Image (spheres, rainbow, N blue to C red):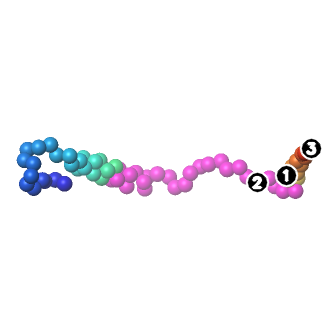
């Protein structure tokens, strides 16, 4: 990828330079590795709790339909 051997001397190379991308990824990796231990453990979330009385919370669904030919 880095060097072309023979052939087209001084021509345009179609190879992508991935060095800057790897540098950015390594910096982001280091930042996340430093920040991760500093974050609080767990998330505070309000989760709906089931009702205490399960018998009264059940409701019946009644579906009626008629068909005439």
Q: Which residue is mark 1?
A: 57
Q: In the rendered structure, are the residues bearing label 1 and label 2 in contact, judged by CB atoms less than 8 Å apart? A: yes
- In this picture, residue 12 sits left or right of residue 69: left
- In this picture, residue 5 sits left or right of residue 25: left
Task: Give 10 or 21, whichever is nearer the viewer.
Answer: 10
Comparing labels 1 and 3, the label whose residue is closer to the camera: 3
Farthest residue toward the front?
A: 69
- Give the mark, 1 or 3, whose residue is nearer the N terminus: 1
The residue lying at 27 percent from left, 51 percent from top is: 22
Specify whether residue 34 is in view: no
Residue stretch rendered in magenta on the structure = 29-55
**Dot 1 surroundings within 10 Å: few (below 14), some, or many (20 or more)?**
few
- In this picture, residue 48 sits left or right of residue 6: right
Task: Give 58 or 60, whichever is nearer the viewer.
Answer: 60
C-alpha span from label 1 to label 2: 9 Å
Q: Within the image, what quadrant is residue 54 found in? A: bottom right
- Give the mark, 2 or 3, whose residue is nearer the N terminus: 2
The residue lying at 76 percent from left, 54 percent from top is: 50
Q: Which residue is mark 3?
A: 68
Element assignment for label 2? loop
**Dot 2 surroundings within 10 Å: few (below 14), some, or many (20 or more)?**
few
C-alpha span from label 1 to label 3: 36 Å
- State which quarter of the image contains the N terminus: bottom left
C-alpha span from label 2 to label 3: 42 Å
Instruction: Decide whether residue 35 is among the magenta residues.
Output: yes
Instruction: Decide whether residue 45 is among the magenta residues.
Output: yes
Specify whether residue 64 is in view: yes
**Image location of residue 27, percent across then percent down:** 30, 50
User: What mark, if any, has residue 50 been given in the picture?
Assistant: 2
């Amino acid at each position: 990828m880095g060097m072309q051997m023979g052939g087209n001397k001084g021509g345009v190379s179609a190879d992508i330079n991935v060095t800057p991308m790897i540098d950015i990824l390594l910096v982001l990796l280091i930042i996340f590795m430093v920040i991760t231990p500093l974050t609080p453990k767990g998330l505070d979330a309000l989760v709906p709790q089931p009702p205490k009385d399960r018998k009264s919370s059940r409701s019946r669904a009644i579906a009626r339909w008629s068909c005439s030919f």
